[in-house]
Amino acid sequence: MDRTLKLNPHARPALSEADVYKAMERLGAYVDITPADFRAIYEDAWTIARQKLLDEVTAGDMMSAPVVTIPEDMPLREAVALMGAKGVSGAPVLDGEGRPVGLLSERDVARAAGCLGRLSPMALLDALLGAGVPDDVFGQPASAVMTKGMFSVDVHASLGQMLELMQAKGVNRLPVTEDGHLIGIVSRTDILNFFLRQR
């Protein structure tokens, strides 16, 4: 199951001729405009609104805080229990000085358990119960399993920048920093919830 965020910030909702006529009828008054003119205005308005959204909404507007974090030396078994208790599917991994050094996600845990590209709850359950997972897998530190490198954004990063980075790096969450310190996280759920709140 591919759960990577796939939002196309350039996609435009289709506008049929029937949609144009319905919108013009809702105005409730005579409008001296052709459907083609209406469509042209719609196209321009959509482009302006989309760009405004991508440029003006920031990481600070939609991030979740405080952030569930995992010490790099925490055993994987404890890290999984912590993420389960907190209801998160991934978390930044911090070094001894509190600096983010990677991300631990359910994909990383599934890969360590031998699921190899079959990421789903049933595939993970099959790996744990069926083939069996060596005892030392969940005893190793989180840093041995995490996705190394940190893909974080500044609190002022725009929605457009975040979507591009998520797509380029194939990640579903971005830690948010301010003056180099971790202050929040933006996940695909945060982005979807932000859009739902705008309705």
Image (tube, rainbow, N blue to C red):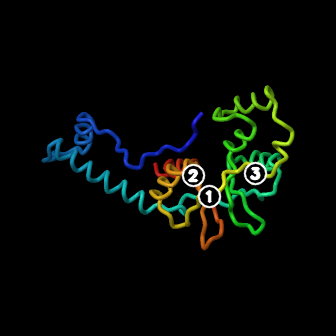
Check disc 1 and report its element: helix, strand or loop: strand
How far apart in space, not on screen, are marks 2 and 3 (Cα)? Answer: 28 Å
* Crowding at mark 2 (Cα within 10 Å: few <14, some 14-19, many 20+): some
Residue at 56% over, 62% down: 153
Query: In front: 143, or 53?
Result: 143
| In this picture, residue 22 sits left or right of residue 165 | left
Residue 124 at x, y percent in the picture:
72, 33
Give the number of the mark in front: 1 or 3: 3
The circle drawn on residue 175 is none
The residue that label 3 is drawn on is 144
The residue that label 2 is drawn on is 190
Q: Residue furthest left?
A: 32
**Three-letter code, disc 3:** Ala
Query: Which quadrant of the rendered structure holds the N terminus?
Result: top right
Query: In front: 75, or 24?
Result: 75
Q: Is residue 144 above or below residue 65?
A: above
Residue 71 at x, y percent in the picture:
78, 59
